[in-house]
Each structure stands twice: as structure tokens, then as C-alpha cells.
Image: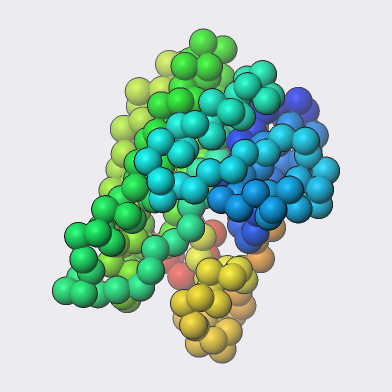
Amino acid sequence: MDLQLENKKALVFGSSTGIGYAIAQSLLTEKALVCVNSRNADRLATTQANLNTKFGVTADLTKANAANEAVHQAVKQMNGIDILVMNTGGPNKGNFSDITNDQWQLDFQNLWLSFTDAVKAALPTMQKQKFGRIVLVTSLAAKEPISALTTSNGLRAGLAGLCKSLANEMAPYGITVNVLLPGYTNTNRLKNLKLSEEQVKQMVPAGRLGDPRELADLATFLASPKAGYVTGQSIAVDGGVLKGH
């Protein structure tokens, strides 16, 4: 299938490793122009070399205005933007009673404000050209709380609602907004949560960890002109964990 992505301009946040890297790679396979992102300049350079893309921006999404500035830089480098893929690092573990106000503010910046800032920066271009694709990568926590990931559970559930509202507002401009909910996927993030593969396999009906490429290919479809009638959706890629939610 030709996804009609050749020369479409995409910015993929958090694309130096894991799911973000796989999404950038998948888009490039479809001949899109891809601007990659990392908070670390050396890692960004390595990612650009490995993916053979000349477009890249450094941005630490835990910092105010970083996402906004990154979008403007990407637009300048690529002379436009058609696709925005928002993929942020997950917050630290913590139960509600243990989380400080500083941690709430940090995670609100990282998970929420980075997304709203990036979208606000990209929308003028997308609205003018009557085309845009916004894909937000979050977590199963958006629909089913995960133990000891309190800030993620709360903020990501809210983001799913925000994206439905945004989908309504942007539909007249040919802009779609969708959320992807990765399940237990074979990434460094999973290792940081200190869950063994055997533990995870017992929790997943499919009996295995997800491959980042499985989610990436769906993200690429949602980012394409072919997915123009899909918007306001939260789609789990989780091996059957959520099922009826």
C-alpha cells in the first residue's frame, strides 16, 4: 500500500531510542522527511547518522518552551510541517502520598505542556495548508491505571480527553488527532520499571512483549493521508491487555 507520505514533513519527538526511533524509521521507509529529536546533542547526531536524515532538533521537554522552540526549528529546517508525533519520556514511579508538588509540576510540563506547546506551534502551518496529522504516544495508563505511576495515570487520561476536543476543533482544517497507547513494549523504559519479561508475559494475553515497530507502523498509517477519516481515537497496541476498555 502506498501511504502517500513521500516528502511529507514530520517531527518526531523522543526519537533517539525506543518507540520514537521506530516511528521515525517507519516514516522514513515511506519516504517522508523526518526531523528527529533528542535532549542530548551527541545522541541526536548519532540518531541522524543512523537514520540518514539531515533534520534534527535538541529539546528537553521537561523545560518550559522547549517543545515550542523545537517545532519552530523543525519548520525552519524542513520548510514546513505536516506531521507531529509527540512521544515523551515517562515519569518516575511514585504513589500519590509520596509525590511532591515539584514532581507534579515537572511531569505536568513533560507530559502535558510540552504537547500543548508543540501543537500550538504546529497548528498555524497545518491550518493554512488544510492538512495535518497529530499523533500522541502515551500509555495504557490513559485508560487503566498502572500501579505506582500516579502522575502518568492522571495526566495521560486527561490528554486523551484533550485530544478528543482538539480533534473536533481541527476536523474542518483536515487535521486529525489520535492517541496511541503502547502496552508492555520491549524498550529501555520497561527495563527502568524493573519488570521482568516473565512478569510482563503473564500479564499480556498475547504472551509476549510488544515490538516498537508494531506500534510504529500504526503511527505511520495514522500520519498518512490514507487515515483522513480516523480522528479523535485512542488506540491500544498492547497484545490484548485492555480488551473491553
Q: Could you tell me residue 104's position as x and y percent? A: 25, 58
18 relative to 98 in the view: left or right: right
| The N terminus - image quarter | top right
- Let me know if residue 20 appears in the view: no
Q: Which residue: 52% across, 19% down? A: 126
214 relative to 205 in the view: left or right: right
> Height in image: 122 above or below 147?
above
| Rendered image coloring scheme | rainbow
- Which of the pair 162/24 is nearer the observer? 24
Q: Which residue: 46% across, 39% down? A: 66
Q: Could you tell me residue 172's position as x and y percent? A: 43, 16
Q: Could you tell me residue 147's position as x and y percent? A: 32, 76
- Which of the pair 58/23 is nearer the observer? 58
> Height in image: 54 above or below 37?
above
Q: Which residue: 62% across, 39% down? A: 57
Q: How many dots with numbers?
A: 0
Q: Could you tell me residue 125's position as x and y percent? A: 53, 17
- Let me know if residue 198 appears in the view: yes
Outermost residue toward the top? 128
> Height in image: 49 above or below 229?
below
- Which of the pair 162/87 is nearer the observer? 87
Where, by quadrant of the figure, is residue 196 drawn? bottom right
| The C terminus - image quarter | bottom left
Q: Which residue: 53% across, 44% down? A: 59
